[in-house]
Amino acid sequence: MQYFNERAERMSKDEKHALQSERLKKVVKLAFDSCKPYRAKMDAAGVTPDDIKSIDDIVKLPFTTKQDMRDNYPFGMFSAPMDDIVRIHASSGTTGKLTVAGSTQHDLDDWTEAVARGMVSAGVTKKSVVHVAYGYGLFTGGLGAHDGATLIGAAVVPASAGNTARQLMLIKDFKADTLCCTPSYAVYLADEFKKAGIPVSDLSLKQGFFGAEPWSEEMRVKIEEGLGLKAHDIYGLSEISGPGVACECSYQAGPHVQDDLFYPEIIDPNTLERVPDGERGELVFTTINKTGMPLIRYRTRDICSIISEPCKCGRTTVRLGRITGRTDDMLIIRGVNVFPSQIESVLIKDKRISPHYHITIDRINNLDVMMIEVELQRDIAFDEIQAIEAMQKKLTADIASAIGVSAKVKLVQCGTVPRSEGKAVFVTDNRKI
């Protein structure tokens, strides 16, 4: 088994606890002393840096949310002077204001190593050719994957997002063995390879790192079959650092959290209390080694669990269970909580169905109505009306059984649902709620 940093990745439980405790105390003091919003939050909670004796005291600290970042736009959450900030990333928000994150060189070095650790754990070496089809720019995906692969010594192809025809050419001709992009774009690339008549056997792909969107185990199978590689879940978010916060190893048993750098918790999103290991809830992260913009108990809104059992790879880092959705992506349909990933899991089990779909929600006569457009595979005849009607009826029943609320399924021809070369948009909610 290959390790990028064996000491960090195989630390004993006692060593990990001591390191996390030391780093938490340091980062809490930094935030309290250097970031006015954090001092105000801690003052309101009646807690001081002296109250934090170990990582176990993290529950005394207040949570941080995306709203805190928006309220202190653009640089109010920074704990380092601008002279020390060497990179600024940002993600878009529904309010029109960006969520801004600043990094020192120290932070970039940690982030880069985190990505490298994850990639090495899944098979990337200095002999690899890594095709990066995440977007470059304010979005962290492209530069994060790029820098991590570069640190390993791999040859990086900075393709960025878009221009799919060129992506196909580069992946094939440059003999890329590693692909980095969103899972929905990976499926799109597989479709385009098939449409172009390029068989999987002509590709050199061995492994891929897919993130930025929730995706299912069924989607993993589609990607692996369509591109002839092993698909690994990589997790990150721009506020924390970007991709590489957690990444699956070659055993594909849940992303390993680089927990000497990022400390995870799972809370009940309603009570805000921590839940036992193994139970699902909202993922919360504390950046215990950042200096530019440390975040304390940041509520990610992602729904998952923590896996503490040892992994076959020998790493002692905790892992994340599959992220099934987000608390803020949750749809409430006629009083029922629904996540798009639940619907996707039903659709993708039918081999006649393409993994391209779109959900539209309307409110008609004060009643919520959900329509799901689903593409057929390219080789399925659309003019066999009886067969299409039977498929729609079965899918409608299967979805109602899975989510507890009815939806109308409309099968459409391959190529009908708009494609995305970045993050896919699966839902349009036209309700005025």
Image: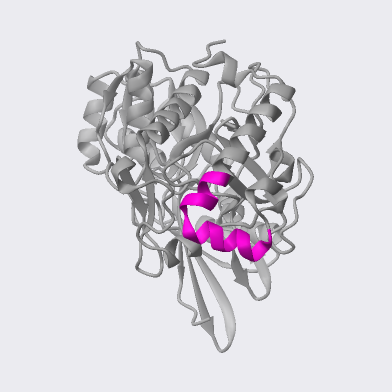
In the picture, measured across the screen, residue 363 lies left or right of residue 176, that is: right
Q: Who's the residue at 58% across and 46% down the image? A: 28
Residue stretch in magenta = 29-46
Regarding residue 373, the answer to whether it shows in the image is no
Q: Who's the residue at 58% across and 32% down the image? A: 255
In the picture, measured across the screen, residue 423 lies left or right of residue 118, that is: left
In the picture, measured across the screen, residue 366 lies left or right of residue 362, that is: right
Q: Along the line of sight, which residue is nearer the eye, 214 or 82? A: 82
Asked which quadrant contains residue 329, the reply is bottom right
Chief secondary structure of the magenta span?
Answer: helix
Q: Is residue 85 above or below residue 198?
A: below
Q: Along the line of sight, which residue is nearer the eye, 235 or 43? A: 43
Image quadrant holding the N terminus, namely top right
Residue 154, position in %: x, y? 33, 17
Residue 232, position in %: x, y? 51, 30
Q: Is residue 83 above or below residue 384?
A: above
Residue 20, position in %: x, y? 64, 33
Q: Is residue 3 above or below residue 80?
A: above
Please check the rendered image and state whether residue 44 is part of the magenta-colored stretch, yes or no: yes
Residue 77, position in %: x, y? 44, 55
Please check the rendered image and state whether residue 338 is part of the magenta-colored stretch, yes or no: no
